[in-house]
Amino acid sequence: MSSFIKRSNGTYGYAGFDLKAAKKGEWVTETFRYSAPSIRNQNDRISSHIWNRSSSAIEIKHFQVDVYEWERSLN
């Protein structure tokens, strides 16, 4: 899986994560945390993708991306 921030002239903040191998008929739950750098422009977009580098078919069920904005403390 990969996550990055897309903008009109390229990308930044790339991170890649390896998924666990599963046996046929077995479901695997994966959780990843990605701390994006500060967004440079309000038009930039966070993008997450599943990239299957193998020649085997995979099935993805309930792919979900949750985005949280951290509150900054002045302390």
Image (tube, rainbow, N blue to C red):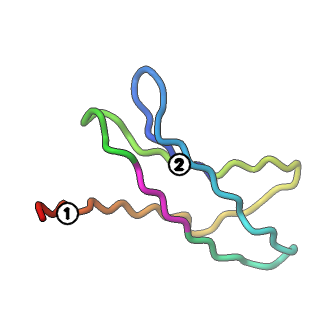
Tell me where residue 72 appears, x and y as whole percent: 18, 60
Tell me where residue 18 appears, x and y as whole percent: 70, 59
Q: Quadrant of residue 29?
A: bottom right
Q: Quadrant of residue 38?
A: top left
- Image point 75% across, 68% down: which residue? 20
Tell me where residue 49 appears, x and y as whole percent: 58, 49
Q: Decide: is 21 above or below 67.
A: below
Q: Is residue 35 magenta?
A: yes
| Outermost residue, left side | 74
Task: Assign the N terminus to one quadrant of the image.
Answer: bottom right
| Outermost residue, bottom side | 26
Instruction: Give the magenta part as a residue range.
Output: 32-36
- To which residue does mark 2 refer? 3
Q: Decide: is 62 above or below 10.
A: below
Dominant secondary structure of the magenta stretch? Answer: loop
- To which residue does mark 1 refer? 71
